[in-house]
Image (tube, coloured by chain):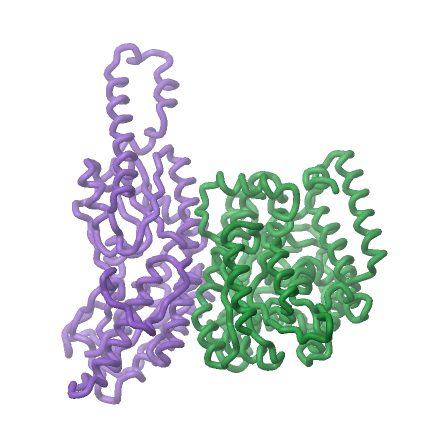
Chain colours: A green, B purple
Amino acid sequence: MPGMADVTGDSLNAALVRTAYLAQIRFKAMRARTARRYMELHALSASLDLFKPGAIVPWVSYLFPTELLTSYGLTPMIPEIGSATLTGTDLREAVESAAARMPLARDVCSYHRIALAAVENDMLPAPSMCLGTTPLCLGKECLLEMLAVRHSVPFREIRVPMPPDEGETAPEVIADVAEQMRVLHEDIGRWSGRKPNLRKAIELSNRASAAWGHIMAERLAGRIEMNGRSTFATVFLGQLLWGTEEGAKDFERLLSEKGRSDLMAPVLDGGRKLRRLLWLHTVPHHDAEIFEMMERRGAAVIFEEMGQMHMETVDPDDPFPGLAKRLTDNALWGSSARRARLNVALAKQLKVDGAVHFNHWGCRHGLGSLPVVRAAFVEAGIPFLAIDGDALGRGGAQQDKARQAMESFLELL
Amino acid sequence: MPYCYYTCNLIPFEIVARNGFTARWLGDHVRGPATQTRRDALSVHPMTCPYVTKLVAAADQMLAGADAAATAPGAEPRAAHTADCIVVPGGCDAARRMGDLLAAAYPDRVFVLPMPRSAVPEVTETLAADLCRLDEWLSARLPDGAARPAADPGSGPHADYPAEPRPGGVFVVAGPLTDDSLLQLISRLGAHVSGLESCTSPDRWRLLAAGTAPVEPEGAAGVMPPGAAPAAGDHVHLAARLLEIGMCPRRSTTARRDYLNRRFDAARPTSIIYARQSFCDPGAYDSLLVAQLAAERGLPYLEIEVDFPFDANGPLRTRVEAFLEAQLLDDDLLAVLDDDDLFGGGPGEDDLLATSGGHGAGGEG
């Protein structure tokens, strides 16, 4: 496998290596014919294009409505995905060293810290524009705006008021967010000098949403049991592909048994009953051991909180209200009480044996809601475990501790 | 008179006062380390800034204590106790989650006030609407006829400069401070302070005090009678004023940068110290910005990690001391260089002085 530097350079040699590498990944995807493999291929391929000279690189927040970009044929650069990918490559040591040398405090979110170190050391492409959303956290808004100032590129933030703890978001709030998106969509066209095709982007996004929404409904109804960790990893990458032809096809591949065959929950030997867990917040991307240990002990994550997005389609004739509603209603946005209520309801619907909250390093909004979420689960009588960790971590004392906590939790279950 | 505790001074005090509450800063009620903790006390994840951690404990103590006092056998319940409430301006994720936690533990006694990052007209209107909700919420907390404009001015973060700030000294950028002990430490170490940028800085609370209606004794002219509906423009004006004054690290980088530049221009410091609380996201990014501004001005810069309440402990004192001593040493050397005939009027003077490191702009003060 070539190194990251080999495939992201702008020399002829790098271009050849990149082409050969993508051909290899494509071959693997064609053999496997699964959504997961194709999504990896297409996300990687689109992301590598961002390293080409002259590429327009929109750095955006994780929940940014990327259809506003695909309308112009642009691929988003999402810091969380960039960091998770880089720390899984041969550049891990280099980017970690760069982050350690950086004056930014070590206690901030590691996704953002690594992303900053990477862009400042040419391991991720520099931004052409930085586009944020108030959901989910303030830290990434600080990062995106700081990058915009440093690189003298435009910064915009979609301001999204908190949804109510109960009930629907007010129509005027949705209208306000929709209007911000409409203006921003026009701004992106002005900055990029490209012509939009939002209708096409929305139609493609809708194909993906319809497929994903169907899969999620089947999972919620208990008719399909998927591996929450792998599924999250796939959807995480899928954030780069909403509104593209590739994204539509890849999500539609999930509809066939073959297409989702490498994302299914394990089946235990001898008819043993699987202990089914709900996973809250992000996952430790590079710690396979904890999940392998869970499987050895007859447990698996069968649903993930963060997969609950893009489950409804948007009106192509008037897309902004639908895109706005998707953002305002995100399960992780809003008060801790709202998050707790939604997750307890989810756990009850799925009839899980327990829930695990991953306390990602430096994530104030996730960690901050933990006491309320925990109390709600305890009150509902659903076993609950919170484990500390770093989503980008690999090995170390903290992961050992998390594994031990998980073992004890599984024994209790 | 019931108390309205607050966690950040970006609340309009006249709204609190005209609804019959005395405003009290929770930072004044932080428990000492020796205080016994209740078994069921609220707690937050350890990866939370000390300010929020301590304020959650203080709020929990105040509200639980008030409940206990009101319901204790034989005790005469004070109506004010059960009406005590907390307003939490949620400027950052940790503060917002603090509000969520307290609201979940003490339903109907906590108001979380969203604090935006920018001050564009739409944002001001949204904040005005939230202030209107706060006004109504406070107004509904006391029985009809019970609310009278508070006569007690309440308490707040009123840390002041130990001596009048003047150019040519240290400029301190910090999160919330309970008192002036950091500034005192700098003075004790032989330097003087050129300015303090903090949410508890006198440069903010004086503006807040001047910009909001002063709390006057009951019945005095200018105080809105209880229950009277404020003018529609009142909340918009208050929102605009709060956003103008509250130019803290959570704000837009560009606006914050301009604001800090103005403050540094006015204070003309020779060095900058950033006292950052651990686990503070806005502070972490803000310290990068301030470090960059210091570099642009050629000013020596020191970042220290501090607790809340501020504790001038050994290692921290040593770091500040070493930083200030290094500057004094540099100043002495520069003085020698200035006096030395070797450099007087020679063609290489500018180059030699330019390499002596970081005294150009600030040294002129």
Residue located 49% across and 64% down the image: A366
Residue located 75% across and 60% down the image: A36
**What x and y, as percent, mark residue A339?**
51, 73
Residue located 37% across and 32% down the image: B298
Q: Is residue A251 above or below residue B263?
A: below
Return the residue nearer the eye: A210 or A33: A33
Quadrant containing the N terminus of chain A is top right
Return the residue nearer the eye: B228 or B59: B59
**What x and y, as percent, mark residue A266?**
71, 68
Q: Residue furthest front?
A: A270
User: Quarter-wise, where is residue B361 in the image?
Assistant: top left
Quadrant containing the C terminus of chain A is bottom right
B179 relative to B41 in the view: left or right: left
Residue located 34% across and 47% down the image: B305
A171 relative to A245 in the view: left or right: left
Judge whether residue A68 can be spotted in this image.
no
**What x and y, as percent, mark residue B65?**
24, 76
Judge whether residue B142 can be spotted in this image.
yes
Q: How many marks?
A: 0
**What x and y, as percent, mark residue A377?**
49, 77
A89 relative to A150 in the view: left or right: right
Return the residue nearer the eye: A190 or B329: B329
Q: Is residue B196 above or below residue A291?
A: above
Return the residue nearer the eye: A94 or B190: A94
